[in-house]
Amino acid sequence: MNCPIFEKLIDYLDGQIASAEAGFVKTHLEGCERCAAVGQWYEKVRTIAASDDMIEPPSWVARRAIRLFETRRSQSGLKEKLGRLVASLIFDSQAQPAVAGVRSTETMNRQLLYEADNYSIDVQISLSEEPRAGLVGQILRKDDTEFESVSRIPLDLIREGETVRSTLTSETGEFSINEVDFGEYDLRIDLVDVSITVAGLPVAQLN
Amino acid sequence: MEADQTRTDMNDDFARREDRELVAACLEGHHQAWEALITRYQRLIYSIPVKARLSPDDSADIFQSVCLKLLESLSALRDHEKIVSWLITTTTRECWRVANRQRRDNPSDSHGRDEDSDHSLEIPDRVPLADEQLQELQQQQIVRDSIAALPERCSKLIRMLFYQKDELSYADIASRIKIPVSSIGPTRARCLEKLKKILADKL
């Protein structure tokens, strides 16, 4: 018996041929392994496609990821010029004399402010859940009111040379890292034009 | 106008390239190749946290984080046959990481959640997605990729037949791809034969 052409097989499987012809194709499929395999292939592909309920991300999510490429490329180009900077500590709330009347719980948060080149890095360490702390902060660039240079920047928290936590800044340069064991860390910030390291970040009470 | 057309043609060209070629082009600095990779895999990456019932914000962050890892791993993936499986593994791990962090931050939320609880606090119990679901996603992605690799007209036709069948009549489809309605059947058969060759033993 001659095999039906591929188009006829597909029409049959899609229920798009007259019943007389359908009967012929059905009978043929029952006795022809080759055509039956084609039928099974088509059914499988059609079933997979029909079950495809993958969700397209909001366009801003995809655009933001596409922008990563240019950001990273400019980072690698510009960093060769600017290199890596180590931030300087310019303020530590626990190095200030205690204000009269402040209760002990209010000193459980430690604020540190660093500067490097045009950037300032504000870090607040919440020490209320010893022996772990929470870090929140914000990176700002002095001449960038739109936050473009500090948005979605990768941050690594490093201890003894090992990256222990990584995160990204928000659209406005803010970041948050929870449940950090007490200790001394380096915070590496991979900005577009420079890589800044906050060295020896003291995640603990001042002794 | 000509520049726009050239850009569109170039984007179409990248969209049809295989993963390995796109990775190589990314490493040579072609941003269109990166855009093509993200466009190709955006649904796959985003669907994993969403299907694992993580919040839209977490899903968006996981998407960004996975894309960043992909960008940083391009050199290692240069000879990788299947980025799909790498992406599924990496995205699943990111979901784990976020879910575990939430569980640590909100230990009471993983037990005794009431039915009206905020969606953003729903945390998957053990694994983000079952293996069968991940395998389904992988197969769906393979079919989508293979359809995208067809010549443009075929790709459009099969996408409409497979993914928009309920929304479009044959007349709509014929008008969109500029062929007579009577040609849809034979054209579809030719396109499916090509698809069969592309898919070969991938499924």
Image (cartoon, coloured by chain):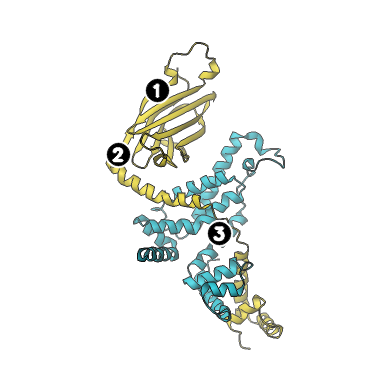
Chain colours: A yellow, B cyan
Residue B155, given in percent of the width and then of the height, sits at 51, 70
Q: Is residue B117 visible?
A: yes
| Amino acid type shown at disc 1 | Phe
State the count of labels.
3
Q: CA distance from mark 3 to mark 2?
A: 41 Å
Question: Which amino acid type corresponds to the residue marked 3 in the rendered image?
Answer: Gln
Mark 1 crowdedness (10 Å alpha carbons): few <14, some 14-19, many ≥20 = some
Q: CA distance from mark 3 to mark 1?
A: 51 Å
Looking at the picture, how far across and down is residue A15, in whole percent?
Answer: 67, 77
Q: Quadrant of the C terminus of chain A?
A: top left
Where residue A19 appears, as percent x and y from the top left, is 71, 83
Q: Earlier in the sequence, mark 1 or mark 2?
A: 2
Chain where mark 2 sits: A
Query: Would you name the residue on which mark 1 appears?
Result: A91
Residue B170 in the image: state x and y as whole percent: 60, 74
Task: Tell me the number on the disc at residue A83.
Answer: 2
| Tag 3 near tag 1, CB within 8 Å | no
Q: Secondary structure at mark 3?
A: helix
Q: Nearer the viewer, mark 3 or mark 2?
A: 2
Q: Is residue B180 shown above or below B141?
A: below
Q: Nearer the viewer, mark 3 or mark 1?
A: 1
Name the subunit of mark 1. Answer: A
Which chain hosts label 3? B
Q: Amino acid at mark 2?
A: Gly
Element at badge 2?
A: loop
Same chain, labels 3 and 2: no
